[in-house]
Image: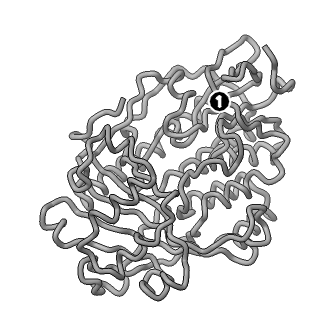
Amino acid sequence: MAVAHPDHDQVLIIGAGIGGLALAQGLKKLGIGFSIAEKDVSARSRSQGFRFRLQAMGWRGLSTCLTPSQLKIVEELFPESSTSGYKINAITGALQDAVFPLARSGGDESAYTVDRALLKEFLADGLSDNIFYGKTFRRYSVTSSGVQAFFEDGTSMAGILLVGADGVHSKVAQQTIPSRRLLDNDGRFITGRTMLTNDLRRRSPVMVDRSCLFTDPHSQSQQTPLILVTDPVRFSQSAQSFTDAGPLQDYIYWVLVSRSETFGETAEAWDRLSSAEAADLSLKITSHWDSGVTSVLELQERGSTRALKVTSDAPDIFEWQTSGRVTLLGDAVHAVTPARGLGSNLAIRDAAAMVDIIAAGGINCSAVATYEHNMRDTAASAILHGLRECELTLKHLSLEECHCVE
């Protein structure tokens, strides 16, 4: 079997998402060798969402993983988020609240509106020799001297620590904690983006400068709220100069959220919806809304629209026997609902926590065990708050009512 990398003293990172890349930058800062194995064939071969809010937790994590000069670039690339937005009646288009506070976690520090693809490009900068694309992880084997990862293409990599940062459907987690099951709280959402064109500015100027929360009074009276959240994503001149992806176009990120009965699709059918079908469904269930509101859906980039379930790990995150050779990070171990926007922030926080512990005591079983203990405590609180917020504000199923996703 071919070995993809000769350095056995390295850290193996499975997954080149935001958490895995942040960890890689932190290891580079410490002078520790690493390799990243990513199943996608290139950095932009697949859409993985559009924007998220980099909150205090995530910023502190980046402060650990990045150099001061890199942090300065982050501030230049991404604008600070607004602290408030508009609440609007979706049926009439009438303003309900001129200003409502946007949820933040981790204090009153600044938050940043981050385009996910651009942040990944930034975090991957300088790591091209360490990222191996087209590497689909199959399994790992703990050895007397470390750990070996095996891939579907027949190659393998050896290292002293393997970190599963491969997302909510993590194959590393499937081997490490096979009893793990995600919870489905019956929440469903359609998400997409709409380019910020002159046509959209004319038809819905309210969306251009601030986040908006559109509520459907009819759905609320039936105890199955249907809401639309929009958020403008604008690119600075620094962002335009940094990227190799060509000119970046400002857009509106949007999410349409309710319960399964509102969308009228079974769980199985929901999982099979194509981008075009999800786009059509978003228009169908909002056909009675004000035309200025639905313009963001009518003009959506149809190939990017996705239908997703609101899933989460349980707050009592599974414990496993720590080997000191394999661990997990981010959604691979503690998926959270999108209600609080914490998924990527938690992944960055995990990466920073691992970097801090390695810097203090090296890579060993005790360090990995300490990381995992602290990670469970931090994530459990975020998971519980996310589920409760979905239950209270969106009328999704309570923790006790959730069912497991196979």
Given residues 75 and 243, the one toward you in this image is 243
Q: Residue, x 75% and y 21% (percent of image)?
A: 155
Which picture quadrant has residue 135?
top right
**Scheme of colours in the image:** one colour
Please provide percent x and percent y for residue 345.
55, 54
In this orientation, does residue 79 appear? no
Q: Residue furthest top?
A: 144
Q: Which quadrant: the N terminus?
A: top right
Q: Residue, x 54% and y 77% (percent of image)?
A: 196
Q: Is residue 66 above or below residue 177?
A: below
Q: Is residue 119 above or below residue 36?
A: below
In this orientation, does residue 223 appear? yes
Number of numbered markers: 1
Please provide percent x and percent y for residue 401.
21, 40
Q: Which residue is mark 1?
A: 136
Please provide percent x and percent y for residue 60.
63, 59
Please provide percent x and percent y for residue 175.
53, 21
Q: Is residue 402 above or below residue 103?
A: above
Q: Residue, x 69% and y 35% (percent of image)?
A: 13
Q: Is residue 321 above or below residue 108?
A: above
Which picture quadrant has residue 3?
top right
Given residues 98 and 199, the one toward you in this image is 199
Q: Residues within 10 Å of mark 1 (few under 14, many from 20)?
A: some
Given residues 378 and 205, the one toward you in this image is 205
Q: Type of residue at label 1? A: Thr
| Horizontal side, residue 343 vs residue 283: left or right | right
